[in-house]
Amino acid sequence: MSSVAGLLALLLHLALVLAGAPLLLGLLRLIKARMVGRAGPPVLQPWRDLLRLMRKQPVVADGTSWLFRSAPAVALAATCTAAALVPSFALGMTTAPVGDLLVIGGLLALGRAVLALAAMDSGTAFGGIGASREMTFSVFAEPVFFLIVFTLALITGSTNLDTASSVVNAGVGLRISMALGLVATTTLAIAECGRVPVDNPASHLELTMVHEAMVLEYSGRHLAMIEFTAALKLLLWMSVIAVLFCPFGIAPHDGPGATLAPWLWLLGIAAWAAKMVLLAVALAVFETIQAKMRVFRVPELLGMALLLGLLAVIFLFVSQGFAQGAP
Amino acid sequence: MSGPALAVLASAVGLLLALGVATAFSRAKVGFWGALLVCGAGAVVALVYLIGGAEPAMLTLPFGLAGQSTILALDGISGLFVLLLMLSGTAAAAASLDDHGHPPATAPAFPVFLGAMLLTLLAGDAFAVVAGFELMSLASFVLVVTSHREQSVRAAGVLYIGMAAIAGVCLIAALALLSAHGISFAAIRAHPPEGWRAAVVLALVLLGPGSKAGLAPLHVWLPPAHASAPGPVSALMSGAMTKIAVYVMIRLLFDLCGPAQPLWWGLPLLAMGLASAVLGAFRANVETDVKAVLACSTIENIGLVTIGLGVALAARAADLSALAGLALGAALLHVIAHGLFKTLLFLCAGAIQYGAGSRLMGRLGGLLQRMPITGCAMLLGGACLAGLPPSAGFASEWMLLQSVLGAVRLGGLGLQIVVCVLAAGLALAIALAGCAAVRLVGVALLGRPRSATAIAAVEAGPPVRWAMLGLAVMVGLIGLFPGAVLGLAAPALRALADTNLAGRADALGVSAIARAQGYVPLGVALLLAIAAVGIMLVLRARAILGHRGGPAWDCGFGAPPDWLPFGDPLTQYSAGGFSQPLRRILGPVLVSATVSVDMPRPGDTRPAMLREHSQDPASQYLFAPIAALRAHMSGLADRMQFLTVRQILSVMVTALILFLIFIAVLEQL
Amino acid sequence: MMPDWLPPAALVPLAPLLGALVLTLVRDARAGAIIAIIASAAGLAFACRLPWLMGSGLFVLVDPLSAHVAILTAFVGFTTAIFSYRYILVELASERIKASRVRQYHALFMSFLGFMLMALLSNNLGVTWVAIEAATISAVLVVSLPRSANAVEASWKFFLLCGVGIALALFGTVVLYLAAFPALGSGYAAMTWTELARAAPDCRGPMLNLAFVFMLVGYGTKAGLAPLHSWMPDAHAEGPTPVSAVLSGSVLNVALVVILRLRGVMQANADAIDPGPPLMALGLLTVLFAAFSLWGRRDVKRFFAFSTIEQSGLAAFAIGLGGVAGTFAALLHITVHTLAKSALFQCVGRAAQRKGAQSFQAIGGLIVSDRALGLTLATAIIAVAGLPPFGLFSSEVLIISETMRLHPYLVPLLGIGLIVSGWQLIARLISLCLGEPSDSPGPAVSWVAMIPAWVHLAIVLGLGIAMPVSIAAWLAAAATVAK
Amino acid sequence: MEHFGYGTMGYDVAHMLGGGVLLLSFALLSQRRIAALINIYALQAIVLAAAACWQGFAQDAPHLYITAAIAFAAKGVIIPLALHRFVHRLNLSGSVDTALGIFPSMALGVALVALAIMVVLPTTSQSQALTREDLALALSVVLLGLLMMITRRTVITQVIGFMSLENGLILAAVGVEGMPLVVELSVAVLVLVAFVVFGVFFRRLRAQFHSLNVEHLDRVGSAHR
């Protein structure tokens, strides 16, 4: 794929992702509402909320520093950058060589750290509690994340999403490791995005809050950016799952006829949208039937995910051992 | 090029040592200015030497051990560490010029400390390296105990010198074992150790220089010692001295022991590295003293470096030279990056200690606004500490994780599972470090001040600010151009593992496999900048700008009353509170933490107490039994002492009779 | 110019001995001290000529080994005499020692020094033995001078143990003569070191073994090797400090030199046992024992006496290692330790006078209260602890290297001893020199008073980092003599 | 010197005298009363002097007569008298304070003699019979002296043990053929000096403590570690 095509794909990808993130959130909320028998807000509601927030003047807590005011923008920028690295409908975007899964993890950690710092800067008990819990969860999430990367790198030979995805797309067979990895990744995504049962984004009880407690002091455009960041993050994780575990339909980057192929892109976009909707439905079902966990149970959940990740890697080793022994 | 470089650096050693003597008889500033100039010049020389290809050079001095001569040598490996030492030393010396950097009593030992470290790096024979290493211990000990009127400082000094004694004896023994055919490095290289000798050398190196570097389980001295020293000295100790120990480990294990060592050599390094990384990072979350947090994070980072070295050692033995190069590159890059950003962080801590009157996190807060430059420098350092892209900490950790991924190719299923556990542990350590960095910055720099001195905090003086600025620029450059640093490390890689990073490290980025996609920090930075500009533009176009101040909402608590000028301090999260979930979850596993609650009965007026008790596993399972054994032995020895004359005579006669029996038996045989 | 019957080397011990005779007549404390300084200076001056007087007779032996240790002893004696000048005046002022005994002090000190030098330079086993015995008696009497209950106890212990030791050594000497009988016949020749060394292969091996055991136990007592060391801590702790300064150097050196020469004889004989293992065993036991004993000490001088015992054990161990390299290391160690330890004791003596007590509890924060004294003491402790750039570091490195080459399995034990003792030495440095200063009722100590200690430490420093080739060759020659 | 061979008159007399010294050592060890102890010590010194005389005669070495004379005068007469005076003046109780019972110490003594013989006889296999016997006897006396020092508590018994040890030394020295004068002189010096120093000590000890019990002294020291 030529550089022009890569750039075009990147721009299209960014437009899709940025526009789609609040929509996905809206869809999720709608499905959840429908499942419990409510009418629910329209899919566009998150977008409307964002625009409304942008038109309100923010109130900033006394005694906070510049970091408090700039944190939402930094977090959003980091998440946007990460989003630019995760392919959605086509491989071979211009940004593909810039970073791999580890870099994406690092960028998400950057966003998380900045928001936690901002929460500490407000000097309130709730800011502290949120930051503390968020960082604690991250401690347990990181090993899971790295083991997933480990599994993928062993199967596909690369930590780069583009390469990995094309290898998976070319066919790696139905592997138990991939299945275990999928479960682990899903758990991780739920924890990272602060969804039920790790956190409840719709919670109104401060003491049970994690992510929401961190951003209690924010208002106006700052809050808009934070909300947008959260939506983007959800989409990003879903895209990661899609691109790694069911990459079919995605437009390849290095075919024999590596030219601009609009029909492939269209196919890719359709497949991606379908996958997102499916995942949103699955998530909605899951969140509806699950209750939120106690804070101190969360590390146990992540520990389970860690064990699954370990199992995935070990199964991989075993199967590799068979593969080497067979011929 | 190489000969003059060595000559200049060797004279720098002499100058620094002489400067120490001169400073003892003149003003303190003489020592610091001198150290600044010498280190600055040394840094330039080292840089030029490395860029110029780092041809090995040798120099023989006419004095040394008992009438023999001393050999000094310079090659790519030592050149790289010399560069780090000189940069760190320049910054620390510059910061010392501040009126509040040091008590003046440290001035004579400061240049000697630098000179001893440089001597260790330039050593070309076993005696010179031991002498430099021990002199470094001694000088740093003097620096640590400067504020000796505090009991805690003296206790830290005792612990420190004891561990230094262990390190010194182990190093001497290791080198003695190696230098059976002559003490020059050339002679040792010609006769690398084999069999049990090699294994013993490995153990001694891990115990000796390893403990100096702060490797678990011999790390317990490090937090109190680094916390006790004045700011610029802790900066040097954490930034440079631990790296000198790493250099000695590399020199002995990779260079002098030769490439023909077995694969399992990497395993102890991996185990100790992982233990240090996890334990150090966890303790960084628990300590409440800013400098102790930084010192614990040093333990963690040394653990990361050691893991890199372990992978490299195993990979070299398995003839996977590409992997060895990657792991070694990761370790060296992390050495440089950590050396500089930890120097920066300790300078910040020193500035805070003076400017805000305390280094206890519970007495700080809100410093970002009162000490803007120190605060920003610490933010940058914190980002590196947490390994956030595109800071200097991330690139090396990225390479390290990649090399651990590659390490599964080293052996069979058992080893693969070990690597797998290593990978999870490594990620845990990195995440813990991130948490510790957030806690450090969040509690010390952000929020409301927690004490009156923190309200009245003053910014550091100009010399410290300039030192921070210089370090920040370097750290930033390393973060953006890790490939360039790896270019400087190329001669070292060639010498140590006979490999290079061609196609894997260039000016733009690094990758795990030649010509494959990797990590391009410049690209990430550019994307971040574009995103930031884009967000700015969107906000300009669509949002209402500006903001309005008001009391923190805090779920309706509202503004604090007038008599609490900075709010109710107790409503703000403390350093202890921040890490409470972690302590509760990991504490019992890692540091045997126990909690006891003393709840008075209703009607009882005494306060309820919650006590947390934790102990480093090294002190609990290693040092406490050893200390008990030592006390037991001393008790036995003491019993021999206060005998009556008659009893002493009995002992003497018994000895004589035993000798006689020995002879009689000998005769009968 | 000089009578034929008086070899020039004999002047070395004669100078202090004559001084001792004169001193018995001098009452004034100052005059006595000055005469002692002059006598010891003369001894040192004569000793410095020894390297040009090499040779051996029936009674006098000047070879690099004896010359080296004699110069060292004379030098330490000289600086200690200088140190004594002020020390005794202060003791007099504080009435810890009676005016009537000061005369005895200087006389005994000089006779002690003279007999030590005599023992070193004598070629005759019997004369060596008599000289050591006489020196011991002088030392015992000096130790008992303060007349406190503890001093009496210490000197009693000192005398009884050393008396038994020296008696056993005499038995060893008789047996040694018997052993050499078949090779050398009767007469004086059979008792000279030079002849013994020459005829060693023809001696009776089993008899040599017996002699070795008795002489090892006998002279080992003087060298303070465990378990024969008990007199040393008491004598150091209770006697006047200048005596500790000399005691920890010279007595030990003389005993070790005798053991060293005996080792040479034993090694040359095929039937005799190898003297190395017993020496190493005793040395190692001493190092470990003394290192662990350091921890519980409350008395400063007693503490450093144990450090002396440890260093003596280390030297004996190095002698036991054998070979030129081991002996070289042992000689270097003896040399630098003697210098460093006497400097250390000089500082300790001043500190004890300044603080009015010699317990660790009473002495603290010296660097704050007396900067010069505190820094010098700290430097001396660092030197004794074997840290660079001082000479003990070099000698310990040499000893460990040589052990590693010959008996690597002993290195852990040696290492434990060195770590345990080094650690405790520095810990005590912290308690003595750092922290809040304790009460200082005694007279302040000036920079000038520290000059002898500095000279010692400067030499130790020089030997540590930049030993001139000539001195290295000289030490190597001394080591070869006793190979 | 064929008249010193086994079975000759010279051998028998030397052997008998040496054996007498050893026997008296055992007597010292078995004695409970201090006054008797001193007397036995004097007797031992006299037998020693006789042995030295005989050796001087047999070896045709006149200087040994001097040794004998010194031994007789100093150790056979002067020292015992002085000791008697001390005991009398200090009003010491008449019995020996033993740390180890009489019989066990005797048994130990026999074991030590056996050890001495086992050590000396093989090592001196090439020497003539007299030297061998003499050295074995001397070593036995030395070891018994040591044993006495460590199994008796009072200072005076320790002193006597020490001096009986010296007797053993002299026995060894005089028995060695052709040993130059130096050694005898040194032994004499030792005896003299030992006495002088002990005398000094006795005076000082009495001045300080009015007691000669050694255990008492040791307790003073252990307060100062």
Image: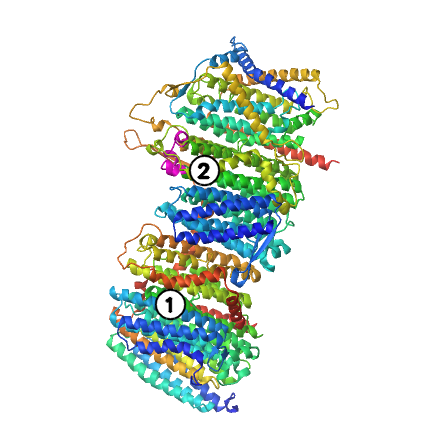
**Foreground label between 2 and 1:** 2
Residue A111 against residue B477 in the figure, above or below? above
The image position of residue D131, as x and y in percent, is 49, 83
User: What residue did someone put label 1 on?
Assistant: C79
Q: Residue at x 54, y 46 (%)?
A: B82
Residue C212 against residue B50 in the figure, above or below? below
Q: Look at the image and tell me whether residue D216 can be seen.
A: no
Image quarter where the C terminus of chain B lies is: bottom right
User: Label 2 to label 1, Cα distance in Å?
Assistant: 52 Å
The image position of residue A290, as x and y in percent, is 52, 19
Along the line of sight, the residue nearer the viewer: D20 or A205: A205
The image position of residue C417, as x and y in percent, is 46, 58
Which structural element holds mark 2? helix
Which structural element holds mark 1? helix
Residue A250 against residue B170 in the figure, above or below? above
The image position of residue B441, as x and y in percent, is 44, 32
**Looking at the rendering, which quadrant does residue B52 occupy?**
top right
Give the residue type that dot 1 points to. Answer: Thr
Q: Which residues are magenta?
A: B351-371
How crowded is the residue under tag 2: few (<14 C-alpha within 10 Å), some, or many (20+)? Answer: some
Does residue B570 appear left or right of residue D139 in this picture?
Answer: left
Q: Is residue B353 magenta?
A: yes
Question: Label for residue B528?
Answer: none
User: What residue did someone put label 2 on?
Assistant: B466
The chain to which mark 2 is attached is B
The chain to which mark 1 is attached is C
Q: Do the CB atoms of the residues marked 2 and 1 lie less than 8 Å apart? A: no
How crowded is the residue under tag 1: few (<14 C-alpha within 10 Å), some, or many (20+)? Answer: many
Give the residue type that dot 2 points to. Answer: Trp
Q: Is residue B304 magenta?
A: no
